[in-house]
Image (cartoon, rainbow, N blue to C red):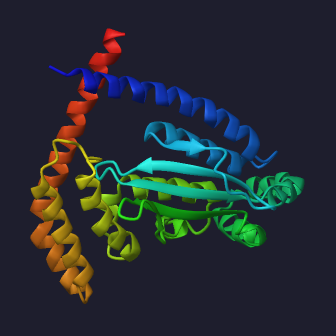
């Protein structure tokens, strides 16, 4: 039987979802580009993702640049509970230039019916706008009571040769949301070092699932340390083989706790 505090927490989450939708409508109005179908679809994808994984967007982050419009993305690691922030800076002058002839570029690509031309034209013509949208990623360090920068390049998370910038930010959001998975990737060195500190801190601060046993946290952290100390690809392959069963058990335990929470939330919704 669920207690009162759990009911209150779940009702607050439902209210937060409604607030997110309102902010998202405003953000689309301010950051869309007339005629840039790809950019606007990319922006919509970011907004849909923010709703699905419980991202909070702050349209008034407090820091502004004279040539940019900014918003902050706030989210927590799905199982780690770690608080992450992504500051997004958008240069509207770039968007205004793109909107002048983006329609012609779209028509040329559609008329060619060629995947090769698509792959050639977009990177070449969008090259001047690679800094149209920039990001600054951080995690909250409870030891300092402040945000700590972590270098996670959105473009490194994409397998496409060229994508609209908001697509890259969606990839970054998912990478941080699934931070315990992402940190195990060999090339995610800086995120891994951040998780080595942030995940135990999150447990001490009570920001992980209260049912999460300390043994699971320590086992995962020891695995990350081993990855970080691996000297070559063969070492990594051996580590993954040795830890595959244990990591699988940790994932299953996390997902079982999440399913229990989802079931309780459905009960609260049914009682309203």
Q: Answer with the quarter of the image where residue 211 lies.
A: top left
Using the rendered image of the protein, determine whether residue 164 is visible from the camera's viewpoint: no
Residue at point 78%, 48% (across, down): 33
Of residues 245 and 71, the one drawn nearer to the viewer in this rendering = 71
Number of labelled discs?
Answer: 0
Of residues 116 and 81, the one drawn nearer to the viewer in this rendering = 81
Residue 141 vertical position relative to residue 16 in the rendered view, above or below: below
Residue at point 73%, 46% (across, down): 31
Q: Is residue 186 left or right of residue 149?
A: left
On the image, the x and y values in percent for residue 196 come to: 28, 69
On the image, the x and y values in percent for residue 252 come to: 16, 47
Of residues 131 and 17, the one drawn nearer to the viewer in this rendering = 17
Q: Residue furthest right?
A: 100
Residue at point 89%, 54% (across, down): 100
The quarter of the image holding the C terminus is top left
Q: Is residue 113 left or right of residue 220?
A: right
On the image, the x and y values in percent for residue 269 come to: 35, 16
On the image, the x and y values in percent for residue 4 come to: 25, 20
Residue 271 vertical position relative to residue 201 in the rendered view, above or below: above
Q: Residue furthest bottom?
A: 231
Residue at point 26%, 47% (across, down): 208
């Amino acid at each position: 039987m669920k207690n009162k505090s759990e009911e209150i927490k779940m009702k607050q989450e439902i209210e937060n979802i409604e607030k997110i939708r309102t902010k998202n409508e405003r953000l689309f109005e301010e950051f869309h580009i007339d005629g840039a179908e790809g950019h606007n679809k990319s922006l919509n994808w970011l907004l849909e993702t923010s709703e699905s994984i419980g991202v909070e967007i702050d349209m008034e982050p407090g820091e502004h640049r004279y040539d940019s419009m900014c918003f902050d993305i706030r989210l927590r690691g799905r199982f780690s509970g770690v608080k992450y922030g992504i500051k997004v800076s958008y240069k509207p002058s770039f968007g205004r230039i793109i909107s002048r002839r983006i329609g012609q570029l779209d028509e040329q690509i559609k008329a060619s019916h060629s995947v090769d031309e698509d792959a050639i034209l977009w990177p070449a013509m969008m090259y001047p706008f690679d800094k149209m949208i920039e990001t600054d990623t951080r995690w909250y360090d409870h030891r300092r009571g402040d945000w700590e920068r972590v270098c996670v390049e959105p473009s490194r998370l994409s397998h496409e040769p060229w994508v609209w910038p908001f697509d890259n930010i969606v990839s970054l959001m998912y990478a941080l949301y699934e931070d315990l998975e992402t940190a195990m990737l060999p090339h995610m060195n800086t995120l891994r070092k951040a998780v080595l500190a942030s995940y135990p801190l999150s447990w001490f601060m009570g920001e992980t699932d209260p049912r999460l046993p300390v043994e699971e946290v320590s086992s995962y952290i020891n695995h990350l340390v081993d990855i970080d100390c691996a000297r070559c690809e063969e070492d990594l392959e051996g580590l993954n083989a040795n830890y595959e069963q244990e990591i699988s058990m940790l994932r299953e335990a996390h997902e079982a706790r999440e399913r229990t929470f989802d079931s309780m939330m459905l009960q609260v919704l049914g009682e309203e």
